[in-house]
């Protein structure tokens, strides 16, 4: 499974925000970036809390959202990890999903750092 | 690790180069300004180091680079301890180097003092750095300026058993708990030399740390604009509230300091009166802009 994550990281997709930067007014673009930043934090918070209370359904639902968010931002590693967590939840493997959550932390931190890079 | 095959074409020919993995954090440009410059949205080598000092600075930039995007065409001879981190700034204050990608290459700092060393924000947990910090007396306290620049804080906590300080409003999934959470916006005097100044704006729980009324460890609240020779704050990466940041900045003008040691960008060093004036002028100008925008 780790190989899938590595492959996904190497094949990170396009960041869909990049074309918007030249199309939008700076203030409008900034608003979008801020929205992504706060949504990433809220989604990670929801995943972490769901993992702490063992709520597999909530982990899976939020991992699905996170995979979408990180996919839009071209973050291959975070997207692949979120998909693995979602898949584990779908298979009813709550323990496996929760065990993967800590791996998300550095991957999402890098996604947030890339978002800051885009905003600067 | 930098790859010669991915060397950016704008590098000048020679030993040092930057490859395509650069994220433009700018760390190399302030650590070794004689060697690294900006081309487009990336850093490149604009001048190969020719003196011993330039070469040492270039090696420090290589070590600090959060994405290992700086390489050399041949195996590097490390020139003694001069090129290693922590790198002295002044009066027992050090730059830790080893910037972390997860914090967009933010800098972290170390205060070495008899009362116990303080690390400001977290670098990568690198073996060479750990050994040198141990030789300097370890770490008693980690001050985390805000939630973005926390990198390997847990590993440092586990290794050194140090107390972590962070604002309660910035605790969350990436830092769930610290030994000493700070509440509210009132300043906290840790001891006669160290004061915590909550500065909401960039994030709700952003804080600065003031040491000996001389060094301001600024996190992402305020940085130093080297070309314009003044301070700045970034609205484009203000995640919480710009108007709140302006109010925080106005409060910051009440403090005395000579150094701004920011998370991102070059340190700034000016007489305290000039720092105060820079903060006041910037706050007034941005305040006018904010009012005009509202109207």
Image: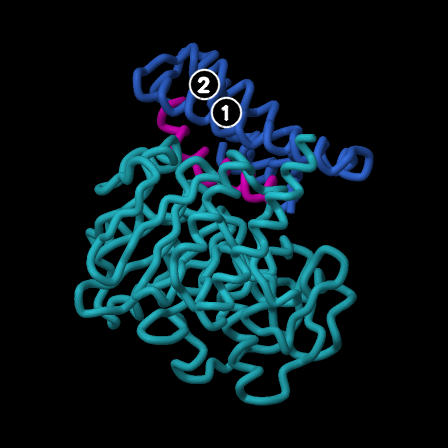
- Name the residue carrying label 1: A84
Q: Is residue B255 left or right of residue A20?
A: left
- Name the residue carrying label 2: A88
**Residue in view at x 33 percent, y 75 percent:** B91
Q: Chain of mark 1?
A: A
Q: Position of residue B58 (x, y in %)?
A: 56, 75
Image marks 1 and 2: residues in contact by CB distance under 8 Å: yes
Residue A103: say if magenta: yes
Q: Main secondary structure of the magenta part?
A: helix
**Residue A14 in view of the camera:** no
Residue B193 or residue B17, whichever sits in front: B193
Q: Position of residue A48 (x, y in %)?
A: 38, 25
Residue B15: say if magenta: no
Q: Residues within 10 Å of mark 2 (few under 14, many from 20)?
A: many
Q: Is residue B293 above or below residue B161?
A: above
**Residue in view at x 59 percent, y 29 percent:** A36
Q: Colour of chain B?
A: cyan
The secondary structure type at the circle numbered 1 is helix
Stretch in magenta: A97-116
Residue B214 or residue B96, whichever sits in front: B214
Q: Chain of mark 2?
A: A
Q: Position of residue B230 (x, y in %)?
A: 59, 63
**Residue A31 in view of the camera:** yes
The secondary structure type at the circle numbered 2 is helix
Q: Is residue A11 left or right of residue B85?
A: right
């Amino acid at each position: 499974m780790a190989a899938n994550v590595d492959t996904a990281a190497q094949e990170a997709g396009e960041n869909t925000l990049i074309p918007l930067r030249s199309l939008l007014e700076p203030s409008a673009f900034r608003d979008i970036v801020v929205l992504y930043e706060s949504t990433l934090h809220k989604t990670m918070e929801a995943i972490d809390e769901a993992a702490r209370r063992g709520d597999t359904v909530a982990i899976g639902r939020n991992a699905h959202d996170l995979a979408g968010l990180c996919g839009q931002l071209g973050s291959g590693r975070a997207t692949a990890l979120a998909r693995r967590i979602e898949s584990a939840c779908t298979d009813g493997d709550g323990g496996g999903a929760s065990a993967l959550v800590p791996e998300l932390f550095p991957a999402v931190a890098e996604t947030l750092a890339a978002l800051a890079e885009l905003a600067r | 690790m930098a790859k010669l095959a991915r060397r950016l074409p704008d590098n000048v020919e020679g030993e040092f180069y930057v490859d395509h993995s650069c994220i433009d954090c700018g760390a190399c440009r302030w650590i070794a300004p004689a060697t690294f410059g900006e081309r487009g949205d990336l850093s490149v080598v604009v001048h190969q180091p020719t003196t011993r000092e330039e070469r040492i600075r270039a090696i420090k930039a290589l070590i600090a680079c959060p994405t290992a995007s700086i390489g050399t065409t041949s195996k590097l001879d490390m020139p003694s301890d001069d090129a290693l981190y922590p790198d002295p700034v002044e009066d027992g204050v050090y730059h830790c180097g080893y910037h972390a990608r997860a914090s967009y290459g933010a800098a972290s700092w170390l205060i070495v003092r008899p009362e116990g060393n303080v690390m400001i924000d977290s670098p990568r947990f690198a073996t060479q750095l750990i050994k040198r910090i141990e030789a300097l007396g370890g770490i008693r306290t980690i001050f985390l300026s805000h939630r973005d620049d926390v990198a390997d804080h847990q590993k440092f906590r586990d290794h050194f058993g140090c107390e972590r300080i962070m604002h309660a409003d910035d605790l969350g999934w990436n830092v769930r708990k610290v030994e000493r959470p700070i509440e509210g916006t009132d300043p906290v005097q840790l001891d006669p030399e160290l004061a915590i100044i909550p500065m909401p704006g960039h994030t709700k729980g952003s804080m600065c740390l003031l040491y000996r009324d001389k060094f301001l460890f600024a996190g992402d609240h305020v940085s130093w604009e080297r070309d314009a020779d003044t301070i700045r704050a970034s609205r484009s990466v203000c995640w919480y509230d710009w108007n709140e940041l302006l109010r925080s900045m106005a409060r910051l003008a009440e403090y005395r300091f000579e150094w701004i040691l920011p998370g991102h960008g070059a340190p700034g060093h000016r007489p305290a009166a000039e720092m105060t004036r820079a903060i006041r002028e910037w706050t007034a100008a941005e305040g006018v802009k904010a009012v005009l925008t509202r109207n």
